[in-house]
Image (tube, rainbow, N blue to C red):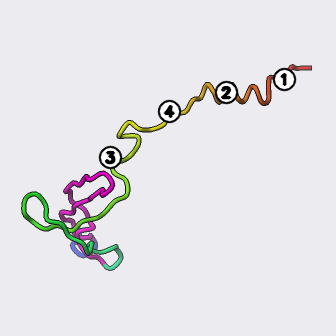
Amino acid sequence: MKKTIHPAYGPVVFRDAAAGFAFLTRSTLAGSTPSGPGVPTRTVEWEDGRTYPVVDVEISSASHPFWTGSARVVDTAGRVEKFNQRYGTRSAR
């Protein structure tokens, strides 16, 4: 790999404040690049005692309706009945 074209890759904490959930992973957000978003300005002290940059996200697996089981189930049978009731079946002439 060429050393000058790849962004820095390092540890970053992604935090979902709505769910109180955070996880430590590695990301290219850890390094500053001329074309990229740069290093997050906020930091957080993690469980291991080290300080890492933190990125706040609006939705994570801890708060997404699909993963939490609170997703609405769409009643497709009701939709078909409603369609037939509105437009009915037309007889062929």
Q: Count up the numbered dots.
A: 4
Label 4 vs label 2: CA separation? 15 Å
Furthest-right residue in view? 93
Quadrant into which the C terminus falls: top right
Residue holding disc 2: 80
Q: Amino acid at mark 3?
A: Ser
Dot placed on the residue nearer the N-terminal end, 4 or 2:
4
Badge 4 element: loop
Badge 3 element: loop
Label 3 vs label 2: CA separation? 32 Å
Number of the front mark, 2 or 1: 2
Residue at point 33%, 55% (across, down): 18
Do the residues under discs 2 and 1 have CB atoms within 8 angstroms? Answer: no
Percent x, y for residue 88?
Answer: 79, 25
Q: Amino acid at mark 2?
A: Val
Q: Amino acid at mark 4?
A: Val
What is the number of the mark on residue 90?
1
- Residue 4 drawn above or below residue 13: below
Number of the front mark, 4 or 2: 4
Q: Quadrant of residue 81?
A: top right
Badge 1 element: loop
What is the number of the mark on residue 73?
4
What is the number of the mark on residue 61?
3
Dot placed on the residue nearer the N-terminal end, 3 or 2:
3
Label 3 vs label 4: CA separation? 19 Å
Looking at the rendering, the stretch of residues picked out in magenta corresponds to 6-33
Quadrant into which the N terminus falls: bottom left
Q: Amino acid at mark 1?
A: Arg
Number of the front mark, 4 or 1: 4
Percent x, y for residue 7?
Answer: 26, 70
- Residue 86 drawn above or below residue 11: above
